[in-house]
C-alpha cells in the first residue's frame, strides 16, 4: 500500500474538488491510501465514508498570495507544513498539493529535507509535445541563480524523473540557450555548457543546446536551465496559450459562422488547453527531496487531483528518490 | 519622398513574393520610392515597369543558415551588404529585408553604424496583445550579455520606438523577470532592476517587473531584457503558437465534426497565426543605428513585405533615429 498525503486546502478551488479527485484516485488505484489534510469538518466526514482514507486535521491553510517563507514560519498547523511533517514522520510516502509553489517548495525543503549530496532541489514539469512525446523541463523557478555544477545535478535529476515517471530509457538532456550552435549563449549559459560537456565528454546523454521553440516540440527528453530562465520561458508558454485561446474567442464572437465552427471545435480546444494546463500530468514535481512532492495548478480540477495523486504514488513505487540519489552520484544507466 | 531599400533575396520565399510586396507598398504610399536590391534579371525588369522603383543590382545573396560575420565578410556584393552601403551613402533612408537576422544585424552595425552614444544596438519587435494593444519587446537576441547601463539604453530606445512607430505617449517600460515583486530576479536581473530604479527613481516611466505571461497580455508599452532571455522568451512564444495550431490540426483530423468546425473557423485561426507571425507589424526592428532597419520573417508574404516597407518609411518620417538619439541623452518626454 502506498500512502500519499493530499492537501485539501491547496489551490483556488473549493475543497470539494480535491475531495472528489481523491475519491476518484482511490477508486482507480486499489493499492493507494490517502492521508487527507484539511479542516476537521471537511476531512473527517470524507474519511468516514471512504476506505483507505485517513484524516490529518489541520486548523490553518496558506493562501496562494502569501509570502512563502513567512507563511510557513507563521502557520505551523497549515496543511502544507503538516503534510510535509507527516511525510518526514513516515505517515505518508509522498505529498500532493495544488497550493502555492513557493510555500510548498519552502516547506518541503525544510520539512522533508534534501537527499544527501543534492545541492539545490528544483522544480520540474513534463511539458506536452508533438506525437505525444513529453519533455521534462527544469528548473522552473526554485533557483533564480544556479552554479554550473548545480546545472549538472539538475540534468541528472531530470533524467531520473524522465526514466521513472515517463518511462524513457537512457533519457538525453539539452541545455536551453539562444541558439543550437555550441558557441551560442550568455556567459552564464556558456559556463553551463562547459560543465555539461565536462560531465559527459562523449555526449552519451548530453544532447547539446535547445531553443525556446523546442520546449513543446517533443524533440528532447529533458531540457535544463536555471530557475530564472525557466520561469520566464514557462510563463511565456502560458501567456501565449492564453493569448491564442482568448483571440480565438474574441474573433469568434465577431462572426456567426466562426462561432458555429468554434462550437463544433470546442472539445478540441478544451483538449489542447488541458494539454498545457498540467491537468493530465498532475503538475510540477519537486526533485532532490527525500520523498516525491507534486504540485498541481492552483486552478485545479477533479481530474488534475486524481492524476496528480496517482502520479505521486507512481513516483514512490518507481523509486524516484533512490533514482535521483543514484543519478547524482553515478548516473542513471 | 522617402526611399527605402528592399532586399529581394531576403527570406526563404521566391523573389516574386518580395516584388509583389514592393508593388503593393508603392501603390499604397505615393510618397514612397524603393531601391530594389537583387539580381539583374529580377530587379531591372521590375523597375522598368514601376515608377518610383530604382534597381540596385547585386550578384550575391546571403542564405538564412550562413554564419553572419563570415557571410558579410565574404559576400561584399550581397543584397544585405550593398543595401546597408546604399543607406550609408544616402541613396536610401532605411532598409527592409526578410533575410537572416544575424547577417542583417552584423552588416547594418558595420555598414550603417551606431548612433553616437549608443553602446549596443538591439533588436526589438512589437508583440500583439489583448484589445489590440501592442508591447515593444527588446533585446530579442542581438546581445546575449548585457550590462546594467546598456539595459537602461535599451529601455530608452524601446520607448522611442513605441512613441514614434506605435504612437504611444510617454511609454512606460517594465523589466522582464521571474516575478513582479521587486525582490524577484537572478543576480543579473536584480542589477538591471537597480540600474532602472536609479535612472528613474520616481518611476515616471519605469513600471517595475513584468513576467513572461505579460508579453502578449497587452498590459505594458515596453518590456526590456537581455538578448539571451529575450531570445528564449520569443522562441517560447513561437513554439507555443506552433504547438497549439498543430494540436488543433491533429485533433481536428480525428473527428468529422471537429474538421467541419475547423473549416468554419479557418479565417479566425489564420488571423490569429498572422497576429503572431509579425506579418502585420513588418517584423523586427534594429534600434540604435543611424537609419531604420526592419527585418521581416524569413517565411515572408506579400502583405509582410508591403507592411514592412511602409513601416520602415513611417520610422524614417517619424524621426525614429533622432528620437532614439534624444532618448538616450535626455529621455523622450
Image: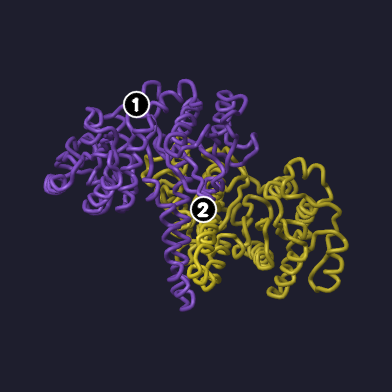
Chain colours: A yellow, B purple
Residue A322 versus residue B318 in the image, above or below: below
Q: Is residue A242 found left or right of B294 in the rendered image?
A: right
The residue sitting at the front extreme is B30
Tag 1, which secondary structure? loop
Q: Position of residue A117 (x, y in %)?
A: 62, 45
Residue denoted by label 1: B114
Viewer-proximal residue among B302 and A21: B302
- Label 2 crowd (10 A; few <14 / some 14-19 / many >=20): many
The quarter of the rendered structure image containing the N terminus of chain B is: top left
Residue A98 sits in quarter: bottom right
Residue denoted by label 2: A240
Determine which of the numbered discs, if any, sits on residue B159 in the image. none
Q: Is residue A102 found left or right of A19 in the rendered image?
A: left
Residue A23 sits in quarter: bottom right
- Label 1 crowd (10 A; few <14 / some 14-19 / many >=20): some
Q: Please, which chain is the residue tagged with disc 2 on?
A: A
Q: Position of residue B114 (x, y in %)?
A: 34, 26
Q: Position of residue A253 (x, y in %)?
A: 54, 63
Amino acid at each position: 500500500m502506498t500512502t500519499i498525503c493530499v492537501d485539501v486546502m491547496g489551490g483556488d478551488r473549493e475543497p470539494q474538488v480535491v475531495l472528489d479527485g481523491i475519491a476518484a484516485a482511490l477508486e482507480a488505484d486499489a493499492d493507494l491510501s490517502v492521508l487527507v489534510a484539511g479542516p476537521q469538518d471537511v476531512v473527517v466526514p470524507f474519511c468516514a465514508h471512504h476506505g483507505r482514507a485517513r484524516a490529518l486535521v489541520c486548523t490553518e491553510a496558506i493562501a496562494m498570495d502569501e509570502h512563502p517563507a513567512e507563511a510557513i514560519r507563521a502557520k505551523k498547523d497549515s496543511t502544507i507544513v503538516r503534510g510535509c511533517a507527516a511525510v518526514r514522520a513516515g505517515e505518508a510516502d509522498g505529498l500532493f498539493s495544488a497550493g502555492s509553489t513557493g510555500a510548498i517548495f519552502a516547506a518541503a525543503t525544510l520539512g522533508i529535507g534534501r537527499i544527501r549530496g543534492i545541492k539545490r532541489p528544483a522544480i520540474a514539469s513534463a511539458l506536452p509535445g508533438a506525437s505525444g512525446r513529453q519533455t521534462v523541463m527544469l528548473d522552473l523557478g526554485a533557483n533564480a541563480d544556479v552554479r554550473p555544477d548545480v546545472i549538472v545535478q539538475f540534468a541528472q535529476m531530470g533524467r531520473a524523473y524522465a526514466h521513472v515517471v515517463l518511462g524513457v530509457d537512457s533519457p538525453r538532456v539539452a541545455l536551453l540557450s539562444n541558439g543550437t550552435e555550441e558557441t551560442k549563449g550568455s556567459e552564464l549559459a556558456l559556463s553551463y555548457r562547459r560543465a555539461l560537456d565536462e560531465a559527459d565528454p562523449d555526449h552519451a546523454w548530453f544532447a547539446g543546446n535547445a531553443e525556446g521553440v523546442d520546449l513543446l516540440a517533443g524533440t528532447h527528453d529533458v531540457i535544463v536551465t536555471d530557475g530564472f530562465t525557466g520561469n520566464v520561458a514557462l510563463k511565456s508558454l502560458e501567456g501565449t496559450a492564453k493569448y491564442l485561446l482568448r483571440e480565438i474567442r474574441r474573433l469568434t464572437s465577431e462572426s456567426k459562422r466562426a462561432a458555429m465552427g468554434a462550437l463544433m471545435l470546442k472539445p478540441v480546444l478544451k483538449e489542447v488547453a488541458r494539454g498545457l494546463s498540467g491537468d493530465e500530468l498532475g503538475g510540477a514535481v519537486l526533485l532532490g527531496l527525500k520523498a516525491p512532492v507534486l504540485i498541481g495548478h492552483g486552478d485545479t480540477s477533479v481530474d488534475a487531483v486524481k492524476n496528480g495523486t496517482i502520479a505521486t504514488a507512481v513516483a514512490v513505487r518507481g523509486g524516484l528518490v533512490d533514482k535521483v540519489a543514484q543519478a547524482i552520484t553515478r548516473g542513471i544507466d
